Every structure is written in C-alpha cells, then in structure tokens.
Image (cartoon, rainbow, N blue to C red):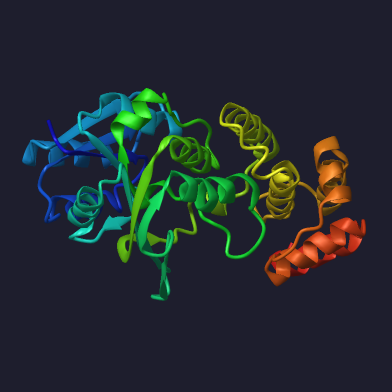
C-alpha cells in the first residue's frame, strides 16, 4: 500500500506527459503510486502512459474510451487510489524534486491531516513568480474555516483572490472518503472540492517553499471562450448553496451569494467578449444586458458594491452598475480587437 496516490488526468498531452511523469519518478520520497487517467485521448498520450507504466511498477494507467472531462477523470483516480494520502498533479505542470517528501514530513511533524505548499507561476516568456497558500505555520479548524473556506465561499473579488488550486495540497484520503467528496463540472470544480474538504479537515500545515511548478498555459480551459459558461456557473452556485447549507456557512459570510454572483458576472462578461465567440458584437452586448437582468445578478448589482478589484475589473463593474453597456462593448472591442 503506497503512502501517497498521485492523480493525473491526461488529455491530448503528448507534449507534456513524459516530463510530468519524470517529475514524479525523481521525487526524493519514493513511497507513491501514480495514477494516469487517459481521458479518451486520440493523440500519442495513451502509448506514453503505457510505456511509463511498463517501466515503473508504481505507475498505473486507466484508459477511458470517451473524454469525460477533468472532474470525471479525477473521480476515477480517487476511486482507484490505494494511498493513505492523495495528491493531484496537472499533466502540463511539474513537481519540484522534494515536493512529496517536504509535504509528508511537514504533515507528520505537525500532526496535521493536510499539508500545503506555495507554488511557482511560470509564463511562456520566462517570467516567474511564487504564490503562497498561506503564511508558513500550522492552522487549526477555526483558522482553516476563516482563511480558506470563507475566502472560497464569499470573497471572490478583492485582490489578491484566494486561488482554489487543488494541486498545492497533500490530502487525507480518509477525510475524502468519509465525507464522500468528489469533483463535479468542468470549471471552478477545484474551488468546490477545496471548500468541502476544508469544512472537514482539522489541521493544516503550510510551508512557503514553492514546491509545485505551475505553467500558465494559454490554451487551457480558463483561457478559452466557454459557450456554456452561464449554465456551468449556475450549477456551481447550486453546489455552493448545498455546501453552505450543509456546513452552516451563511452566518460566517452573509453576503457570499452577491459576492460570488458579481465574480461570476465579471467572468461571464469577459467570456462573452472573448475572441473565440462568433456572435456579432451587437448580439454580445444584448447577451450581457440579459445576463445583468437575471434576478440573482440584478440583486447583486443593486445591493452589493464590489471593492478591491483590479483596475480593469473595477472599470467593468462601474460600467455595469451605471448600465453603460455601449461603452462597455466599445472598451472590449478595443481591448480584444474585435
């Protein structure tokens, strides 16, 4: 039985896969298993997965006939994992060599059920910058709720926003199984997973060492036009409502719905004016106006004033609150060269 199960969803990743796997094989902590979930790949990824598994008995491969999305892939990994602890790794990213060892020892020495590390953001132009989860230390259940759960629930606007990256943590498999925590959806699924997990965790140990290398990929889902974004966001809010009710979070953050709806609206507006959208500009403006008239969005616009946004998003929020949709459209036309 391995100590740590590492879950990697794989989809059309032949360009990145080998180096991703190598970053696991070269870990100074050897007691792991690597679960490669082939999510219906049609490129050379399945063959690379099989070759890696043939070369190292700690690697297991699961081939799915059809692409089911990252949530289904991770859920399959969770169902098949044998380790006492769970880690996630995206196929286009890398672990630093001492990542697993550091997280394991940090958790063991502190008596925590979960450990976390900082990560290094890497851009294609060579620029890089570290990003913390929290300051180094050991956090009890109350502090976890205040600093992670509440941030994910109701503070999605003020900069810097707490990022819901799931791969910065070493998780207790027992907590995940007892609470029956799973992934759902193709976007923002990591935030919901973290919220629910940390509603059940008791102790978190954090290091400021950047042990994970996160490559900013311009072709990832977060950088593409999403035709079904509003439907995805509505389901996200439904799940958030369920979690808030189950764990009685309303009292800690009474205006989380308005805050979250503002955050979703700003993303939806940016998505509507993305270059990949083939609608005429006038139709895009009409769609944005209709979005702002949705009851939950209209309530957020009327009753909640966004604060702490970056300058671009603050400008968008101000134009929306003033109903200056023509000016908003012209701004995005210039910005995105529509």
* Residue 270 visible in the picture: yes
Residue 201 in the image, given as x and y percentages of width and height: 40, 39
Direction from residue 127 to residue 227 in the image, left or right:
right
In the rendered image, the vertical position of residue 185 relative to residue 92, given as above or below:
above
Residue 115 in the image, given as x and y percentages of width and height: 31, 50
In front here: 82 or 41? 82
Residue 61 in the image, given as x and y percentages of width and height: 21, 32
Q: Which residue lies at the image location 44% right of the left edge and 58% below the top edge?
A: 217
In the rendered image, the vertical position of residue 202 relative to residue 322, given as above or below:
above
Q: Which residue lies at the image location 53% right of the left edge and 45% below the top edge?
A: 149
Quadrant containing the C terminus in the rendered view: bottom right
In front here: 189 or 147? 147
Residue 8 in the image, given as x and y percentages of width and height: 30, 41
Quadrant containing the N terminus in the rendered view: top left
Direction from residue 237 to residue 299 in the image, left or right:
right
Classify residue 45 by image quadrant.
top left
Classify residue 137 by image quadrant.
bottom left
Direction from residue 28 to residue 123 in the image, left or right:
right
Classify residue 129 by image quadrant.
bottom left
Q: Which residue lies at the image location 57% right of the left edge and 51% below the top edge?
A: 151
The number of callouts visible is 0
* Residue 337 visible in the picture: no
Q: Which residue lies at the image location 67% right of the left edge and 37% below the top edge?
A: 250
């Amino acid at each position: 039985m391995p100590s740590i199960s590492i879950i990697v969803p794989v989809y059309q990743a032949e360009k990145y896969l080998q180096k991703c796997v190598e970053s696991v094989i070269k870990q100074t902590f050897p007691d792991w298993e690597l679960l490669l979930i082939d999510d219906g790949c049609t490129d050379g990824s399945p063959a690379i997965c099989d070759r890696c598994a043939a070369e190292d008995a700690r690697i297991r491969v699961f081939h799915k006939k059809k692409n089911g999305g990252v949530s289904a892939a991770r859920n399959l990994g969770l169902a098949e994992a044998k380790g006492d602890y769970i880690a996630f790794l995206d196929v286009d990213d890398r672990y630093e060599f001492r990542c697993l060892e550091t997280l394991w020892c940090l958790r063991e020495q502190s008596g925590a059920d979960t450990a976390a590390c900082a990560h290094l953001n890497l851009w294609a132009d060579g620029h890089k910058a570290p990003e913390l989860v929290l300051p180094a230390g050991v956090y009890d259940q109350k502090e976890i709720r205040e600093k992670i759960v509440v941030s994910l629930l109701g503070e999605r606007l003020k900069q810097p926003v707490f990022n819901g990256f799931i791969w910065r943590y070493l998780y207790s498999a027992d907590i995940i199984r007892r609470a029956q925590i799973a992934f759902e959806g193709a976007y923002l699924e990591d935030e919901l997973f973290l919220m629910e997990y940390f509603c059940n965790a008791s102790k978190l140990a954090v290091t400021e060492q950047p042990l994970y290398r996160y490559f900013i990929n311009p072709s990832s889902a977060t950088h593409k036009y999403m035709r079904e974004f509003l439907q995805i966001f509505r389901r996200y809010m439904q799940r958030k409502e369920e979690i808030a009710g189950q764990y009685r979070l309303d009292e800690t953050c009474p205006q989380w719905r308005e805050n979250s709806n503002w955050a979703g609206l700003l993303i939806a507006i940016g998505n509507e004016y993305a270059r990949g959208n083939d609608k005429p500009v006038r139709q895009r403006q009409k769609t944005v106006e209709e979005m702002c008239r949705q009851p939950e969005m209209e309530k957020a616009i009327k009753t909640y004033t966004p604060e702490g946004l970056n300058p671009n998003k603050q400008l968008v929020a101000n134009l929306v609150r003033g109903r200056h949709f023509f000016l908003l459209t012209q701004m995005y036309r210039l910005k995105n060269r529509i």
